[in-house]
Image: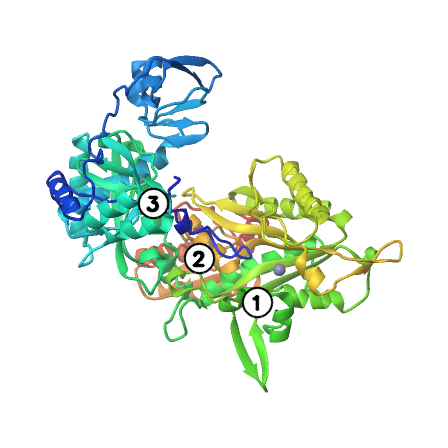
Amino acid sequence: MLLLLSSFLVQARSSGGERYLDTVEVGGSRPPAPTILEAVLKQCVSAGIDVSMPFLFGCLKVGSTQEIGMASINITLPDGSVRELPSGASVFDLAASIGAGLAKAALAGKVNGELVDVTASLSDGAKVEIITEKSPEALDIIRHSASHLMAQAVKELFPQAKVTIGPSIETGFYYDFDVERPFTPEDLERIEAKMSEFAAADLKIGRQVLSSAEAIGMFDAMGEPYKAELIKDIGAETVSVYSQGGFADLCRGPHVPSTSRIKAFKLLSIAGAYWRGDEKNRMLQRIYGTAFVDKKELEAYLNRLEEAKRRDHRKLGRELDLFSFSDEVGAGFAIWHPKGAMLRTILEDFERKEHLKRGYDIVVGPQILKTELWQRSGHYENYRENMYFTEVDEQGFGIKPMNCLAHMMIYKSQLRSYRDLPLRYFELGTVHRHERAGVLHGLLRVRCFTQDDAHILCTPEQLDAEIKGVLSFVNDIMAIFGFDYEMELSTRPEKSIGDDAAWDLATNALLSALKDTGRPYEINEGDGAFYGPKIDIKLRDCLDRRWQCATIQCDFTLPERFDLHYIGPDGEKKRPVMVHRVILGSIERFIGVLIEHFAGSFPLWLSPVQAVVLTVTDNQIPFAQEVHAHLREAGVRVQSDFRNEKLSFKIREAQLQKVPYMLVIGDKEVEQGVVTPRYRDGKNLAPMKPADFVDFVALECKNFK
Ligand SMILES: [Zn+2]
Ligand SMILES: [Zn+2]
């Protein structure tokens, strides 16, 4: 959704692959009811505003043919065919000329690539596409229209509420209101009911262009200071105002033609939000909602939301006793309990092995480095607010937010020849970054995390093969975890360093590696870091959510700033290329994603506890102890429950802990010297000797089952 308030577009930002995208688009909205209209007009008069202008409510000719002149225009349709229409014809007229069904289905138009209302008049030679519910653009238009519908309902129920902004977002929409008291869940129900009422009333939605001065006067008169402020900031000569049933709102549009086209919506939650995201400003009340083209899709989405709640890693982290956070320790610092720490260890061991297999060297750098070094790298200048600093013996130190610097010092510790390259330094590097308190979220956004970080230093000629190597590494790892993923290439931004040849080389290497995978990818033109192009990879979990994991970034600055070089075949000093890359990204976040993806039921190879030995009565304890010891010594992660409790109770508890295998030891097992493994879903394996169970577990783990 494009909105006119570009000055408030909060850009999705990413830094070092560690920040995920909180994309917030900003739109406009605002409302009076039919009775309010008169009052507004009176206010306008008393404020000296010319109300003789065709005010916003007189312009609603949706679906009707507007002044049609004598001349005619030619319009090109997506299939290349050309239609002749009377001049002044609208998108709607075009749809109607094709068929009554299409006219009924039309939600908006796309004219020369730009989305417009169905009422927009067309000019000669335009390329036009009719947007219907089936078009990919429809959802955003519906959601944005739903946010206006919500604002209309709020103004109806809470006339004192002041409207601010209401954009569509990736999962639906929101709208921020300035109200005297916070909204309650009961308010949400009333607002939603009012929205349904307005939707059923099939109110026409109209658009009018006003001069900024007129619009400011109007919103001031309506007691909507936020809108007036926004228009001043936009600083355009004219702005567009949308109205429906006496409710008017500043907006660029487009919108659906009438409120009945918003057929499936749901209000979801309430949150506090500062005006313009600035803590110094007034706290507003934000209502989040979602909308879909039909009820079926809405239902499916709401079910997914429920499922996501059930899988919430913070809830499961507590229930499975994996990790905790403590105010006494500090927000954003995870504390790993035995089972969580085991899960980390399994992942870390796995990563070390996989990296060694692919020719990486494991290195370890210090946690704090002199401030001067951060100044040299540019972090002090550009990233200081996110760093922690300390001082000892009058020497300043910065706690590392990235692992690159020590790796470069290792490179510089010797004279390097082209024959030594590529060098691939891998570190499970723990970094600290000061994130704002408001963005912290369980393990998904923390202030201390460990990256599976590596830096590849190679000759320009080697770059191609190195990038391909990293992409195939990513592919192998994602397959092991069973994740599908998406790739994006971000190219050179306007402000950047490095010469054209270097950018071309790196961009081509990334591009050719992407092509080589045979998988689809997207290109974000101009979205790369100032120091080099990059590939971002997002995995898709079982709820179809995207999570940033791997990034591959080429860097032209650091080798320059640290004067890295190698001796080429011609005996001359040359600059190596530096590639920063992570595969899983942050181990913390990856674990958060794994917990939600598997709903805590980890596959055997990842399970912190793989089996639990259960006794039926105390008679079996000696044999059960033997089994436990055998398994533990053989490397199976095993626990036991010999309590004098009912077996069903002990099984239930192990199931809640999502332990893959329960080994129930009864008299029969003791007699025959066997175990009967029972999987957490209730299926039994055949009785087997403990040693055979050890082999079974080892084989499953080897195959990442
Ligand atoms: Zn709007
Ligand atoms: Zn790095």
Residue 544: % across, % down: 43, 42
Rendered view: 581 above or below 524:
below
Out of 258 and 515, give the one closest to the viewer: 258
Residue 39: % across, % down: 11, 44
Indicate which disc, 2 or 3, sits on the residue closer to the N terminus: 3
- Do the residues bearing badges 2 and 1 touch, measured as CB atoms within 8 Å? no
Q: Quadrant of residue 193?
A: top left
Question: Which residue, given by chain and number where applicable, does mark 3 sit on?
Answer: 27
Indicate which disc, 1 or 3, sits on the residue closer to the N terminus: 3
Say the numbered circle drawn on residue 381: 1
Q: Amino acid at mark 2?
A: Leu
Q: Quadrant of residue 267?
A: top left
Out of 449 and 270, give the one closest to the viewer: 270
Say the numbered circle drawn on residue 444: 2
Out of 483 and 377, give the one closest to the viewer: 377
Q: How packed is label 3: few (under 14 Cα within 10 Å), some, or many (20 or more)?
A: many
Seen at 71% across and 61% down, the residue is 560
Residue 258: % across, % down: 24, 30
At mark 3, the secondary structure is loop
Marks 1/3: CA–CA distance: 33 Å
Q: Indicate the quadrant of ligand 1 in the picture.
A: top left
Residue 211: % across, % down: 31, 41
